[in-house]
Amino acid sequence: MRGALALLLGLEEDMEVVAQVSAGDRIVPEALVSRPDVALLDIELPGRSGLDAAADLRTEVPDCRVLILTTFGRPGYLRRAMEAGAAGFLVKDGPVEDLAEAIRRVLRGETVIDPALAAAALSAGPSPLTARERDVLNASVDGATVSDIAGKLHLSESTVRNYLSSAIGKTGTRNRMEAVRSARQQGWL
């Protein structure tokens, strides 16, 4: 998909694709070298999420505008993308001409958001999870024990249990794996 998009965008007279990367942890290093005007990022990437990379680009390459293009059109992701400094958020189901125009608009300083997703995000409200609750849920994704999570996040085991309990309550689920699943479906993780 990345290669096809790059090829199609490269056909636009006023656009040049200066770099392509396949992993989220390669975005910032490549942007520091190629200095793009606009970075077109997905959310789910190996190595690091596009949302995390967007936040880092805002700091490391402040002149680069970020446009998120994803199949994951979830209100929580939109909110997180905007908090990370993204200038746009589109779902991958539109024609490439619309994407090219969105890139132009972002480059002009406009904010571009899929209208249906914007409406859904406004009605969904913000994530009820704190940053630390998100960290603990993210650390438990692979079935890590409370002890493993505590060591990874430099917290006590009782603090980890408290965060997990709070996240389970806020997501209305029965256990941490259900909480992770629910939070992911909402776009909070």
Image (spheres, helix red, strand yellow):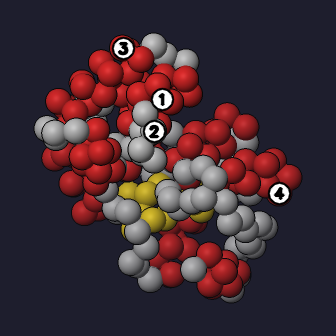
Task: Answer whether residue 106 is visible to the viewer in this image.
Answer: no
Question: Where is the N terminus found, in terms of image quarters?
Answer: bottom right
Relative side of 63 to 159, left or right: right
Q: Which residue is tagged 3?
A: 158
Within-10-Å neighbours for mark 3: few <14, some 14–19, many 20+: few
The answer to whether marks 2 and 1 mark residues whose Cβ atoms lie closer than 8 Å is yes
- The amino acid type, in three-letter code, at marker 2 is Ala
Q: Nearer the viewer, residue 96 or 162?
A: 162
Instruction: Give x and y (percent) for residue 71.
Output: 40, 68
Between marks 4 and 1, how big is the CA–CA gap? 37 Å
Task: Answer whether residue 55 is visible to the viewer in this image.
Answer: yes
Q: Which residue is tagged 4?
A: 34
- The amino acid type, in three-letter code, at marker 1 is Ile
Which comes before the other along the chain, label 3 or label 4? 4
Find residue 149 and name its label.
1
Which comes before the other along the chain, label 4 or label 1? 4
Which comes before the other along the chain, label 4 or label 2? 4
Foreground tag (4 vs 2): 2
Q: Residue at x 45, y 13 (%)?
A: 156
Q: Secondary structure at mark 2?
A: loop
Find residue 122 and name its label.
none
Instruction: Give x and y (percent) for residue 147.
Output: 46, 25
Q: Residue at x 55, y 74 (%)?
A: 100
- The amino acid type, in three-letter code, at marker 4 is Ser
Which comes before the other along the chain, label 2 or label 3? 2
Within-10-Å neighbours for mark 1: few <14, some 14–19, many 20+: many
Q: Secondary structure at mark 4?
A: helix
Q: Which residue is tagged 2?
A: 144
Within-10-Å neighbours for mark 4: few <14, some 14–19, many 20+: few
Between marks 3 and 4, how big is the CA–CA gap? 46 Å
